[in-house]
Image (cartoon, coloured by chain):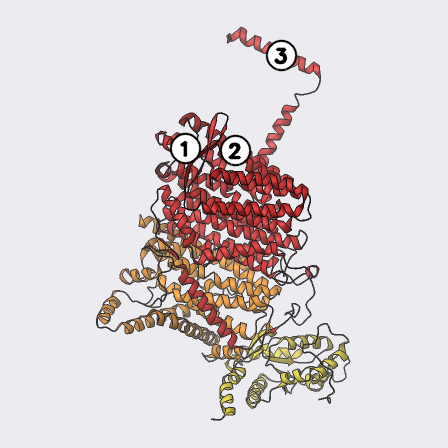
Chain colours: A yellow, B red, C orange
Amino acid sequence: MDRNKLVKWLKAPTKMGHKYSLHVVYFCTGCGIIEIPPVITSRWDAERFGVIPVATPRQANLFLITGYVSVKTLKAIIRTYEQMPEPKFTVGFGSCPINGGMYWDSYNTIKHLDKYIPVDGWIAGCMPRPEAIFVAVTHLWTLIDKGMADGYKKYREKYKYYRANQEQLYGKMDWPPLFPIEDKDEPNPS
Amino acid sequence: MSLQLILIIAFSGAFITYLLGKLSHRVRDYFAVLVSCALVVIIALFYGKSVGKTFYLVFLDLPLFLELNTLSWFFAITIAVMGVLSIIFSLSYIKGKERTDFYYLMMLLVNASMLGIVLSGDLVSFYIFWEIMSWSTFLLISYNRGPALAAGMKYIIMSVIGSAAMLIGILSLYTTCGTLIISEIAVNITSASSGYILFILISFVIGFGIKSAIVPLHTWLPYAHSEAPSPFSAVLSGILIKMGTYGFLLIMYVVIGLKAFLELGSGLLNFHYILCWLGAITIVIPTFIALLQNDAKKLLAWHSIGQIGYIILGISFGMSLSVAGGIFHIFNHATFKALLFLTVGAVEYRTNGVRDLNSLGGLIKKMPVVFIGALVGAFGLIGIPLTNGFVSKWLIYKSLILQGQPFLAFFALIGTWGTILSLYKFLHNIFLGQLPEKYKNIKKAPFSMQFPIIIFSLIIILFGILPGIPLRVVNTIVTSFGFESLNVNLWGIASETGALNTVNIFAAIIVAGIIVWLIFKAGRKAVSVAQDDNYAAGAYVPPDKYHYTVDFYNPLYRMISPFLRDFVDKFYTKLAGWTRNLCSGVRRLYTGDVGNYVIYIVLFLALLIFIQLNWSIW
Amino acid sequence: MNIIGIVLFPPIAFVIGIFFIGLSRRIMARIQWRYGPPIIQPIIDIIKLFSQRSVSHGIIFGLGIILSLAGSIVVVLFLPLGKICPISNSGGLLVIFYLMLLMPLGAALSGGEAANPNTSIGISRKLILALGYEVPLLLILLAVMTYYKTISIIEIVTIQQSMGWSLVSLPLLLSGIAYLFILPAIMGVRPFELIKAPQEISSGPIVEYGGNFLALTTIEHALSLFIGIALFVNLFLGGGGIGSISLQLESLLTSAGLGCIVSFLTGIVFFIKMLVVFVIVILINAVYPRLRVEQAIKYLWKWPTLFAFIGLVIVLIIRR
């Protein structure tokens, strides 16, 4: 077997680990959180997929942004996202993170979450049913298999622009940049 | 090479240091360290030899003698090592304070008088050196003025009461045996009745018990140890209170003798059994009172009382294993308690005198060597395997369990858990947790403070892995008392009923540690983050508000603090208050008016005449 | 034989511990009328955790967990499994008791370095709970040691094979019942699950652990489950033998030269006993809520301490 295949075979257990053991940060962003407790309790059992909620972002891989994102909450979301260990995946849940949803003309909500943190997938609906979460999780497995769930790599490479967007919104941030920023000229990704 | 040489060097070294201090400070520092090192070297040269009575002085028509046997050598080497390391520590601790010449004089004088106590061969020189030690300790406890004065007063009053009780014992021994030389008293006292032996024992136990702080007599210790300067607290907790235990060993096993001591009393009320129970109570209650303290040195001082309980329990139990464990614990406790007090001293030195546990934190990043010293000292005090504390405690527990005394063993074992809780609070509130803003720029401890800390840590770990080295000396002492010998080899004790092999445990822990470290490296390397990149539920960590120190064991405090007030202290204070009221009542007789005094004289004469007329006594 | 035992014991203990963790999640799920994760879910979790890149707050942050895991591996080497005990002659039950202190201390040191008040509160809860269950546990251990007049755990196991299990022998019955009462506290399951408490103190001491550190913590949890139950089975349930029948069978097989089959069979019996005890504890875990620290201590210092104390007095009376 050639070298690529050997590397793929050696990395297969880690891919299996990322797929079948997704720990969710139990972060209640907006109104969508009401759909999460039925998902993790007995009726629609998420634990058989390996998905359980954990209390701190340091132990989690998956970040579900459920519901609308106000300007105040976005600070906590960025902080929590930066505290998660890599590799990490983000899923926007509901139509509010996608394009503003019901609050499309409000002064206080974020319409395009993708400018501030990288998002791997979206679930449409207002609110989506619990079975939609399971479809999203299995779709995320396919993405991980193909290596396309690389939001965290994008965050690392293009951090300069994410940070610039965050600073445009808040002015000076409370915490220093997560990755060192050099001044190099690159075309804007989004 | 004679025993008088040791005492001459020690005492004259003290006075010459004082005089040299008037000339130049640097010369005085070097000379003090030189004297202490010379003492260590000379005493080390006496290893294995025992010297009989050597006459050295005549005092009040009584010849005074010095004597050296293995027990004295064991204590002397501990005193000397403790002395030299605390003097090295004080080089930077005491610099810049006032009256430093007086400080060095007193430190060396305490050292010298303790050496005199363990080398003395008759009871008069024992008493003289005991008194010199007591009042030089008092002067040194009151060195920082202020609350230290009250602490020193409490100490000296109780110490004088103890010395008075001891004097009663010495005088009655003189009248009964006609001599004051210890080896001759041991021969003469076998013919005394058991009631007399009990009286002698009680008077000496009160004297030595006050000095070594057994439970009803312990109230001076927390105040004295916390207000004294830190290097001297190390000497106090390390070896000075063990002088009381030296006295116990002398009285119980050298003077009275093994058989007579163990058979004193009847049935369940054996005298040594009561002492064991006193020791057991001394282990439990002060260790849990230490949980409630907010001052780092008071916490360690209450622990000193607790560990003395272990020593008393081991010594009075009367089996060779437990006596060996008790004697070994004397040396062990000296090492780790001195180490812990020295670490508190280093922290105090760098933070300008702060030793309040509620306001320190996170100092591991600034003072790593001090933290490692505190960690090794804490592990030794708890009794983790691979430290010497474990070996001595294991000996005591094994003899207690195999002799069928599970309740005493229970008290001893529960003391370990109290130790763990309070020492974790000590370590956490000083070294772990968040670093406050005002201590962000403190420097590391100076080398003269790091040196004794490193030496003590090495001693603790070395004697934990290879306990055979000190256990051989302890074995000699135990057989000289008349117990059976233990089967000591380099790594522990071998016996049919469960052996101890510390090298096995050490090898197992090292191998397991290496394997786990390799597993740890199998994962991905972790990123180092700053202290304020911490989980705070999405918010930014507020500076100086994220440290949990106050009321560290709050649920436990609510449950056990009603039972842990210091009843004995309140009783003594009340007793002192009654005495003062009585004396102020008597003082009212002195009105200062001559007319009143004339009436007193006339009334007294009338009373005498009345008695003579009625009952014709004279 | 000893070297093989030393090398094989920690992996066997780890596998049994991981199996127990997976089994506990599955049983809890079934009690709650749902399917649960597959039984090998903890292994998948550990694999994922080893490939995560987490943060560290200092040197002691990693060294503390390494110390705690090393301590639990050494304790495993001291406990006999069936007939094999790798390190046997180095101090007995007292050394086991003192080495078990390394586990909470290592976690406490590493958690203290994390500089988070949640860890400090979690560790203070852990130490207070440990003080709570140590009082009856010490009385029970002292009763066992006094009754059998030894401090070596192998001798206790051997004596039980000829004299019957401790749990059903009259003097130690009360001590055994008291031990069953405090077993959930030793293992950290409900109603004494106050250390991790995700909803109250955000996972307590493990709040800042990710990646490597959390994987080592999970391994250490598996080993501590093994240690807690193995100690109970060795002291009270005869550890590896089923009475006098097994003695005759063993002597038969050993004289036939099949010593390893004897070890294997005793290992299987030991595992079955551990499984029964563990399932009972998990069933208690499924039903009870979580107590507060002071409620936990009030309970632990009331009835189990009373039973253990009376048990110790009975042992002293009978022994005289």
Q: How many marks?
A: 3
When the figure is inspected, residue B591 is found, relative to residue B119, above or below; the finding is above
Q: Earlier in the sequence, mark 2 or mark 1?
A: 2
Judged left or right of residue A152, residue B272 is: left
Q: CA distance from mark 3 to mark 2?
A: 46 Å
Q: Residue C85: percent from the left, percent from the top?
A: 35, 66
Circle 1 residue: B198
Query: Which quadrant of the structure image shows residue A117?
Result: bottom right
Question: Could you tell me which chain the residue with mark 2 belongs to?
Answer: B
Q: Nearer the viewer, residue A99 or B32?
A: B32
Residue beneath disc 2: B128
Q: Which residue is mark 3?
A: B603
Tell me the kind of residue under disc 3.
Leu
Secondary structure of the residue carrying numbered label 2: helix
Question: Which circle, 3 or 1, is nearer the viewer?
Answer: 1
Determine if marks 3 and 1 fall on one subunit: yes
Give the class, few, some or many, for how many residues have Cα within 10 Å of label 3's Cα (few <14, many ≥20).
Answer: few
Return the x and y of residue C173 as percentages of the image width and height.
35, 57
Q: CA distance from mark 3 to mark 1?
A: 46 Å
